[in-house]
Amino acid sequence: MTRIILVLFFTTTISSLVNAQNTKNSKDDVTVYYLVRHAEKDRTNPQDKNPNLTTDGVNRAKNWKDILSNISFDMVYATNYNRTKQTALPLAESNNLSTVIYEGNNLVDNNFFKVTKGKKVFIVGHSNTVPEIVNKLIGQKKYSEINDSENGSLFIVTKRGEIISEQLLIIN
């Protein structure tokens, strides 16, 4: 009887340790990407290739920070344009992070996956680059270019090991 109790005790203990280690590993293995197109840009000068955000755009950038305030981000990415950097700024500042600048379509590669693994990442891009990045993250061509008047799309891509899921929320 004592032998059975010891076997059950050790089996339960080992099982608990394995489950705890698996939970830790799976938590470390979860990466979540939040992607948005830059907020509303100033269109008053059609010759300006690097406009700033409008007042509505600045407010939307602050709203992204508020909407995502319960998430502790590890990294923030934006292209090297005023509108994307200004969209990323409130969220980066609220998480005490610097914004990492990336080249439009050259973000997602093996190094990117290695650097971001297990992290929560906010990415600001453009009407054409955000869907392309999402498609690369999910490994399929599912999303097409965002309408130029749409600034409220929030893509969330979650990677748990080899399992990938995505959501698209429209927040206006």
Image (spheres, rainbow, N blue to C red):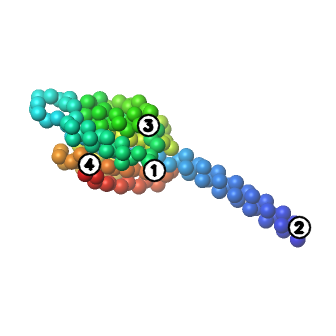
Say which label, 1 or 3, has the lower sequence index: 3
Dot 4: element: loop
> Mark 4 is on which residue type?
Gly
- Between the residue at mark 4 and the residue at mark 2, the CA separation in whole angstroms equals 64 Å
Check whether the beta carbons of the residues at disc 1 and disc 4 lie within 8 A of each other.
Answer: no
Q: Residue at x 39, y 50 (%)?
A: 157
Dot 1: element: strand
Is 81 situated above or below 34? above
Percent x, y of residue 135: 33, 48
The residue identified by callout 3 is: 95
Say which label, 3 or 2, has the lower sequence index: 2
Q: Nearer the viewer, residue 65 or 28?
A: 65
- In the rendered structure, the answer to whether residue 8 lies left or right of residue 123 reads right
The residue identified by callout 2 is: 2
- Between the residue at mark 1 and the residue at mark 4, the CA separation in whole angstroms equals 23 Å
User: Do we see residue 167 in this rendering?
Assistant: yes
- Between the residue at mark 3 and the residue at mark 4, the CA separation in whole angstroms equals 21 Å
> Mark 3 is on which residue type?
Asn
User: Do we see residue 113 in this rendering?
Assistant: no
Q: Nearer the viewer, residue 165 or 90?
A: 90
- In the rendered structure, the answer to whether residue 3 lies left or right of residue 67 reads right
Q: Residue at x 55, y 46 (%)?
A: 28
Instruction: Find residue 159 and name its label.
Output: 1
Dot 3: element: loop
Say which label, 2 or 1, has the lower sequence index: 2
Instruction: Find residue 152 and name its label.
Output: 4
How packed mark 1 is, by other alpha carbons closer than 10 Å (few <14, some 14-19, many 20 or more), is some
How packed mark 3 is, by other alpha carbons closer than 10 Å (few <14, some 14-19, many 20 or more), is some
> Mark 1 is on which residue type?
Lys
